């Protein structure tokens, strides 16, 4: 059972366009929502993250929108560039008695064309 | 880049053989994690460690064991490898058990093929 559902699976956007990736979660115990970017042959790298008491967070061209009541959040990449071509994972964190555990979405492969 | 080294980076082995993957960190972080990445599943937590000799199971721990005898090293062992364990394995580290201001940093992975 996928606790964090991510869509679309793949996305093609023209240079300068807006890329939008959506995620939904079920577990209300999640208390932080990061996005990771992964290039081929590399590990995921933290891109941006948001707490559930905030509706929007922006860092440069990257914005997270968060809807707590709907249990949904999304990543917007403004002015998409070919260098943004990568796989993006949404994730959710829950704190247990011993550690913080990350649950990942299934990933979105973004291709930005010229 | 966070000081995380995974070894080997690639390995091909046969069903039934034991396999050990190593994660070495130079950051002195307390928490270490092993994930596997498979198409259509994202990354899934196998085991994690919250201190030397302190480990616990993750979401997909069956068939795997771990050990941590030193802060800097976290080993993942497949006692008897099966083809279903063919995957890319990632190690991650973090410094605090915080909600998100201490994110997990990932190594570059080990690609394991079991024939």
Image (spheres, rainbow, N blue to C red):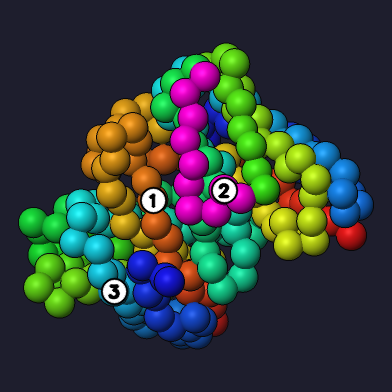
- Residue B59 part of the magenta segment: yes
Q: What stretch of residues is rendered in magenta?
A: B53-62
Q: Residue A75: horizontal and vertical position, in percent?
A: 30, 70
Q: Secondary structure at mark 1?
A: strand
Q: Are marks 3 and 1 in contact (CB under 8 Å)?
A: no
Disc 3 chain ID: A
Task: Indicate the quadrant containing the C terminus of chain A: top left, top right, bottom left or bottom right.
Answer: bottom right
Subunit under mark 1 = A
Mark 2 to mark 3 CA distance (whole Å) = 25 Å
Disc 3 target residue: A24
Residues marked 2 and 1, same chain: no
**Callout 3: SS:** strand
Height in image: A64 above or below B110?
A: below
The answer to whether A80 appears left or right of B110 in the picture is: left
| Left or right of A44, for residue A103 | left
The residue shown at (83%, 39%) is B18
The residue that mark 1 highlights is A102
Q: Position of residue B5 (x, y in %)?
A: 65, 31
Residue B3 can be seen, yes or no: yes
Instruction: Identify which residue is drawn at 52% across, 19% down.
Output: B53
Q: Nearer the viewer, residue B45 or A42?
A: B45
Image vertical order of residue A54 relative to residue B17, above or below: below
Residue at image x 41%, y 32%?
Answer: B94
Q: Tell me which secondary structure the magenta stretch mostly adopts.
A: loop
A52 or A35, which is in the foreground? A52
């Amino acid at each position: 059972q996928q606790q964090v559902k991510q869509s679309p699976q793949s996305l093609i956007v023209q240079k300068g366009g807006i890329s939008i990736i959506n995620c939904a979660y079920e577990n209300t115990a999640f208390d932080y929502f990061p996005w990771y970017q992964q290039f081929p042959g590399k590990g995921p790298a933290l891109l941006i993250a948001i707490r559930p008491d905030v509706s929007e967070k922006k860092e440069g061209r990257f914005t997270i929108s968060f809807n707590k009541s709907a249990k949904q959040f999304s990543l917007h990449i403004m002015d998409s560039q070919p260098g943004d071509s990568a796989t993006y994972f949404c994730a959710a964190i829950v704190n247990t008695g011993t550690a913080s555990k990350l649950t990942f979405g299934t990933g979105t492969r973004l291709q930005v064309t010229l | 880049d966070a000081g995380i080294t995974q070894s080997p980076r690639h390995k091909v082995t046969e069903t039934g053989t034991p396999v050990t993957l190593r994660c070495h960190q130079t950051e002195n972080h307390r928490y270490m994690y092993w994930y596997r990445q498979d198409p259509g599943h994202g990354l899934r937590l196998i085991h994690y460690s919250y201190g030397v000799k302190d480990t616990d199971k993750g979401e997909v721990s069956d068939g795997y064991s771990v050990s941590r005898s030193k802060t800097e090293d976290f080993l993942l062992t497949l006692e008897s490898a099966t083809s279903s364990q063919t995957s890319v394995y990632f190690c991650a580290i973090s410094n605090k058990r915080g909600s998100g201001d201490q994110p997990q940093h990932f190594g570059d992975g080990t690609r394991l093929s079991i024939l």
